[in-house]
Image (tube, rainbow, N blue to C red):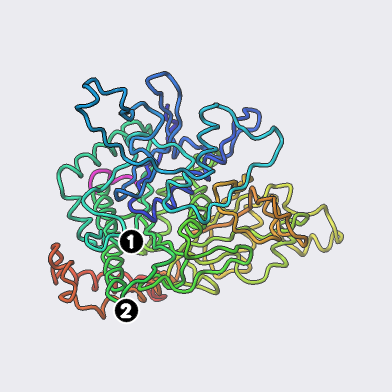
Amino acid sequence: MASGREIVSLQFGCYSNFIGAHWWNLQEAGFVYNADTPSEINHDILFREGVTSEGYVTFTPRLLLVDLKGNISHLRQEGVLYNHNQAITPSDIQWPAEKVELICTPKEEKNVFLNDLEKEENAMINTEALGSLPKVYNLDNVVNVWADYLQTRYHPRTVSLINQYENNSGTNPFDVFNYGANLWKMEQFQDDFIDRIRLYVEECENMQGFHILVDGSDGFAGLGTSAVEYLEDEYSTKSRLVFPAIPSSFINTTPRQDSVRVLNLALSFHSLADHSSLFVPLCTGSSGWRQPGAPRQFPHLLYNESFAYHSSAILATALDTMTLRYRLKTGIYSQLSEMTDTLSRLGRRAAVASLGLPFAMGYDTYLQDTLEKWEGPLWQTLSPSSNLENDRVWIQSVVLRGVPELRLRRAQRGGRMQQDTNPAYMCSTVQEMLSLFFSCCSYATASHVTSANVPCNVTSPFPQFFSEFVGLDGSVRIERRPQNIGVYSVPAIAGIHSCRSAGEMLEALHSDVRKLKLKRFHNFCNSGLEEDEYRECLDHLANLRECYHEEFDI
């Protein structure tokens, strides 16, 4: 039974599904099964309860996703929780065997993580010894698609596949915005997808809105933005928080392919500025348009930007953390709409994302000590062509997780005089302490701060790309972590920022796209993009950029 404040999630595209697979894994890793220590997080907001025909209770993401055929590997489109269309074997055929030729699709090989997961599920037990640390898997060289590390089980209606186009195809790529927009206009696809949305919405008691992850640089941009436009028309009172995602690496691409991506991104931003409540571009690259650019550096991470498995994990951690503002049980009065409305004031529909992973605290230090000694920014920017360091921030929503109240500050020290002169001693919560820090040490005009005791659970299949000086609990240490021990949980800080950098991001995109002549890109023209629409897109990006000028403040 739904508990209210529900959110329906949509994912469009391969890279968005890479991010989504990590995000759902992270949430499931945070489930608490001990009634004596209930979770801070209201998982009913993003998950739904169901019952199979055999009477088994299921708990699956309230999710719809779209991808190309060939991108789900071993995963069955209808999932494994419900008995749908079991595979046919030779013994099922009633005709004489000599008159029947049975052709079977080759079985996809599963990696060791998936095989172990299947064994646990079949046995209905955890095969790890009680009290032992979770097993660490190195999946860097075996992950080809997002299904290779997906732990969460999806509902039968979740997965939709596009059969008209092929993944990594040299002859029939899904690489043009209008290909996706035209696919949405196909009656069969649209009716089916809308019906799936409706079934989820009808289950909700008091839905907050939608999370939408969409690949912004290919045909899925057109499909996803068309879906957002539909949501605005059909569910106008519900918030639509959109994350256009840009992969961290494009290998062996031509200048023409780079230009096509710029066009797709410009068209998607143009549409999202009109039809989303707020959109927050995501990319671990510093540039993001023609090429992702130099990878963003995190002091305690050793990730490989060429692995989508790695970069998508970073973005998923940011999503899981920044959305806690309206997913905590204690935040019953905090709504998705409250955040999107505040951050998008004055027409500033585009915002910038950030993440600090891990939030670097020593294992024996306290939050007050950490903040007083902190040098540099608390986070790394995760939106392209923007930089939050020393940025002009008008308003920001920030979440710090994994720092309990017991780690707020040391016992009283330094005498009464120091306590009287240091306002930090007046803070009684993590939220108050971090708010004070922002008011004294940042360029933010206003900050909404949320804190949660629960850390981010990064057990396998989350990649083990943490520095050897990060302990198993995510604390930063002087001594090295043993090689056979992984990192299992980490404190993290993430935010969404309405800031001057968002305008610079839009200016950089506008500067790149206005150099392109539409008539040279026949695939766009032939699929229905008119010169007038293209000019409207350019003008809209320029006008949106104007919203971020200082003199626009009132």
Percent from the top left, x then y, of residue 483?
A: 70, 55
Q: Please indicate whether residue 382 sits to the left or right of residue 69 in the image.
A: right
- The residue where tag 1 is placed is 216
Percent from the top left, x then y, of residue 374?
A: 68, 67
> Residue 371, located in which quarter of the rendered image?
bottom right
Percent from the top left, x then y, of residue 485?
A: 69, 50
Percent from the top left, x then y, of residue 197?
A: 29, 39
Q: Which label belongs to residue 100?
A: none
- The residue where tag 2 is placed is 511
Viewer can see residue 543: no
Q: Quadrant of the N terminus?
A: top left
> Residue 214, located in which quarter of the rendered image?
bottom left
Tell me the SS state at disc 2: helix
Q: CA distance from mark 1 to mark 2?
A: 18 Å
Type of amino acid under label 2: Ser
Q: Quadrant of the C terminus?
A: bottom left
Tell me the SS state at disc 1: loop
Q: What crowding class fits label 2: few (fewer than 14 Cα within 10 Å), some (14-19), or many (20 or more)?
A: some
Tell which circle, 1 or 2, labels the residue nearer the N-terminal end.
1
**What stretch of residues is rendered in magenta?**
233-239
Q: Nearer the viewer, residue 241 or 56?
A: 56
Viewer can see residue 467: yes
Type of amino acid under label 1: Gly
